[in-house]
């Protein structure tokens, strides 16, 4: 709970009740808005906190203790104001809202009420808990403060994939794309890379914050925007359906570096630090296959008496454990010091433990947030920061320390996903009685 005796100004953030696990942990005291990027998207509004309490009497005492010199500039006689009432987990009728506003008459407002265009906006926020089946008569806690600003949640609507020029089957949701960019601390003039770029949803989000963006993908058709369309009632993609067109749609085409067809298992980049952030969503083998290009090294030598022609397959299976090991190794070599890697890790929930999260000697895990997909599966947003440059000894660390050994259980995620889905469908069919003829 905020300490009224502290020397810092205190702020209250009114957050949207979605993607709760992705909120960065912040303290009310020592709040630095420049560092709480994710709160811009998850916040509805920000307030200068004047007082709080569990009852109206406690709220009154807290408000009267708030320094008068801090309140005075907003209570002047020649000013205009209005008071809003926000509630969580309960809807109040208009009459009840007016009564709660009238109960604040001990505050020395000298200005004129203006509901349409006030100079100052104040807000009473009431928390009625999180259980919709057990809503108390009185709020569990009340807060009062001066409105400072609204968040940027309109970005989620204006950047909706439904309105996007170029989309695919796995295009990332706009809200989650912005959250990933925020976890990566993407800022103006950064260079951001996505090794599994797909239709470029993450590049769109990162460019919104002023970063230069580039990416690669093994899928030729997706990179070049050709082939079958993902939209309903559209058979083939149009001539201008590509990642560059998406950035053009949002006015950030000047930040588009390029995309190219490339295999994430066989890096095409020079061995030095280039990227400020790597933000990506690797394929899990559910809606998009996990594959890599074939190589002579992967072919078992045929017997001496083999008379057929040797063949290198166009593509081969790319196991999830190898995908993550390659991704972390790439980040260790190609991120600048302090740069961040942000990616999704698919998880079979009954077996999950923190030891399943891939680690690297040069990368420090900073956050691990879960998005539940079903009763048995989820994906975790992993954020890592590069804290040291790679050394030759790191290879030995991988061999000696089991924490850095790729977790092979990720390779069976696809089978476990569909196994759980089959069981669920089986239960549903048993629970639904069949119509008799």
Image: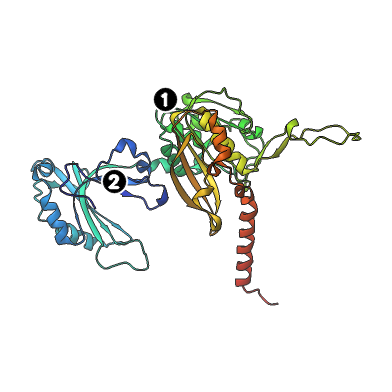
Q: Is residue 413 above or below residue 393?
A: below
Q: Residue at x 50, y 25 (%)?
A: 273
**For this rendering, which residue is in front, 120 or 60?**
60
Residue 315 showing in the rendered view:
yes
User: Where is residue 92, by image quadrant?
Assistant: bottom left
Residue 27's disc is 2
User: Where is residue 385, by image quadrant?
Assistant: top left
Residue 147 place in picture, x, y as percent: 23, 45
Q: Is residue 403 left or right of residue 221?
A: left
SS for dot 1: loop
**For this rendering, which residue is in front, 357 or 292?**
357
Distance, label 2 to label 1, CA atoms, is 29 Å
Residue 39's disc is none
Q: Is residue 49 left or right of residue 392?
A: left
Q: Is residue 225 left or right of residue 186?
A: right
Q: Is residue 138 above or below residue 220?
A: below
User: Where is residue 291, by image quadrant?
Assistant: top right
Question: In terms of sequence position, does the residue under pointer 2 or pointer 1 come before the other?
Answer: 2
Q: Within 10 angstroms of label 2, few (less than 14), some, or many (20 or more) residues?
A: few
Q: Within 10 angstroms of label 1, few (less than 14), some, or many (20 or more) residues?
A: some
Q: Nearer the viewer, mark 2 or mark 1?
A: 2
Residue 7 place in picture, x, y as percent: 16, 42
Name the residue beneath numbered marker 1.
189
Residue 228 place in picture, x, y as percent: 66, 39
Q: Is residue 418 left or right of residue 80?
A: right
Instruction: Say how the picture is coloured.
Output: rainbow
Q: Quadrant of the C terminus?
A: bottom right
Residue 194 showing in the rendered view:
no
SS for dot 2: loop
């Amino acid at each position: 709970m905020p300490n009224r005796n502290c020397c810092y100004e205190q702020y209250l953030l009114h957050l949207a009740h979605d993607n709760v696990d992705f909120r960065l942990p912040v303290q009310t005291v020592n709040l630095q808005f420049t560092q709480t990027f994710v709160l811009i998207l998850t916040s509805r509004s920000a307030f200068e906190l004047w007082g709080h309490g569990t009852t109206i009497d406690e709220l009154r005492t807290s408000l009267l203790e708030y320094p008068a010199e801090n309140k005075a500039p907003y209570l002047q006689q020649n000013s205009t104001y209005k008071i809003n009432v926000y509630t969580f987990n309960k809807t109040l009728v208009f009459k009840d809202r007016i009564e709660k506003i009238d109960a604040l008459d001990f505050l020395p407002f000298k200005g004129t009420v203006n509901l349409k265009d006030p100079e100052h906006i104040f807000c009473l926020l009431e928390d009625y808990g999180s259980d919709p089946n057990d809503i108390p008569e009185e709020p569990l806690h009340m807060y009062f403060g001066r409105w400072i600003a609204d968040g940027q949640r309109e970005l989620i609507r204006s950047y909706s994939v439904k309105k996007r020029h170029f989309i695919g089957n796995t295009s990332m949701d706009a809200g989650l794309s912005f959250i990933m960019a925020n976890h990566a601390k993407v800022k103006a003039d950064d260079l951001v890379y996505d090794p599994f770029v797909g239709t470029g949803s993450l590049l769109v989000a990162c460019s919104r914050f002023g970063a230069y963006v580039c990416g690669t993908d093994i899928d030729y058709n997706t990179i070049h925007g050709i082939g079958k369309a993902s939209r309903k009632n559209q058979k083939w993609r149009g001539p201008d359906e590509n990642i560059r067109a998406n950035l053009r749609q949002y006015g950030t085409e000047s930040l588009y570096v390029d995309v190219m067809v490339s295999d994430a298992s066989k890096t095409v980049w020079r061995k030095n630090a280039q990227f400020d952030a790597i933000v990506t969503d690797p394929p899990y083998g559910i809606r998009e296959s996990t594959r890599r290009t074939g190589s002579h090294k992967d072919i078992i030598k045929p017997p001496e008496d083999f008379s057929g022609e040797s063949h290198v397959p166009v593509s081969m299976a790319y196991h999830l454990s190898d995908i993550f090991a390659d991704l972390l190794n790439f980040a260790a070599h190609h991120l600048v010091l302090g740069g961040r890697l942000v990616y999704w890790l698919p998880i079979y929930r009954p077996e999950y433990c923190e030891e399943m999260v891939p680690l690297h000697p040069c990368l420090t895990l900073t956050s691990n947030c879960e998005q539940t997909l079903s009763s048995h599966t989820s994906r975790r947003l992993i954020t890592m920061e590069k804290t040291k440059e790679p050394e030759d000894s790191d290879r030995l660390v991988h061999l000696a320390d089991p924490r850095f050994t790729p977790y092979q259980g990720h390779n069976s995620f696809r089978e476990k996903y569909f196994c759980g889905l089959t069981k669920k469908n089986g239960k549903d069919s048993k629970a639904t009685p069949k119509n008799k003829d």
